[in-house]
Image (cartoon, rainbow, N blue to C red):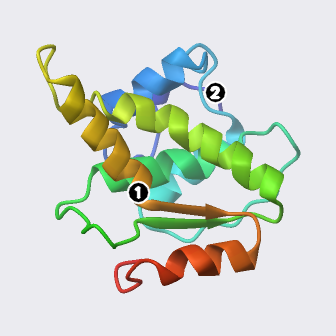
């Protein structure tokens, strides 16, 4: 089921240029998505509930990170300063840290989206920061609850 990312079957819309740029920069452009990614990403982007079980290294993290980033980038109405775009709860702090690092890779390139070569670095940084602030990632219920107390939950 391996195919290029830009022509992943079943997508409701093509992946953004910033997502494709991140995948290329991270070395994923040559191999295409794994079976779990090829199945889950189109479903997530079509706003379907998805549950998957797969072995370590099968690509589960990218299978949900890509749809979350794509959804946040495609919001018609930008979220306010206290709104949350996504909550990710992992079973351990270590896994939460790893997930956060993957999100940060996509956020780096998302700052480049929508601007031309002359775009101010400050504007790119603002976009990265805004996208980063839309995410709550935690490794245990208590830390996520503390973060959510700081934001409005009516847009989650």
Q: Nearer the viewer, residue 35 or 17?
A: 17
In space, the residues marked 2 and 1 are separated at their CA atoms by: 33 Å
Q: Is residue 87 left or right of residue 127?
A: right
Q: In the figure, 65 relative to 24: above or below?
A: below
Q: In the figure, 61 relative to 14: above or below?
A: below
Which image quadrant for residue 59?
top right
* Secondary element type, mark 2: loop
> Which residue occupies 69% across, 66% down?
51
Q: In the image, residue 50 lies at what x, y percent?
A: 62, 66
> Which residue occupies 81% across, 51% down?
94
For residue 2, the mark is 2
Report whether residue 12 is seen.
no
Q: Nearer the viewer, residue 63 or 147?
A: 147
Q: In the image, residue 96 lies at what x, y percent?
A: 72, 54
Task: Indicate the quadrant containing the N terminus: top left, top right, bottom left or bottom right.
Answer: top right
Which image quadrant for residue 34?
top right
Residue at the outermost right position: 55
Q: In the figure, 68 relative to 66: above or below?
A: below
Mark 2, Cα crowd under 10 Å, few <14 / some 14-19 / many 20+, is few
């Amino acid at each position: 089921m391996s195919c290029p990312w830009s022509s992943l079957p079943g997508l409701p819309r093509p992946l953004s240029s910033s997502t494709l740029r991140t995948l290329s920069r991270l070395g994923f452009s040559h191999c295409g998505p794994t079976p779990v990614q090829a199945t889950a990403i189109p479903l997530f982007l079509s706003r379907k509930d998805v549950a998957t079980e797969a072995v370590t290294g099968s690509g589960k993290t990218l299978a949900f990170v890509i749809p979350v980033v794509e959804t946040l980038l495609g919001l018609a109405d930008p979220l306010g300063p206290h709104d949350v775009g996504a909550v990710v709860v992992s079973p351990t702090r270590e896994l939460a840290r790893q997930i956060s690092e993957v999100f940060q890779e996509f956020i780096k390139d998302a700052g480049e989206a929508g601007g031309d070569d002359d775009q101010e670095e400050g504007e790119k940084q603002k976009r990265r920061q805004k996208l980063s602030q839309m995410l709550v990632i935690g490794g245990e219920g208590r830390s996520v609850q503390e973060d959510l107390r700081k934001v409005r939950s009516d847009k989650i």
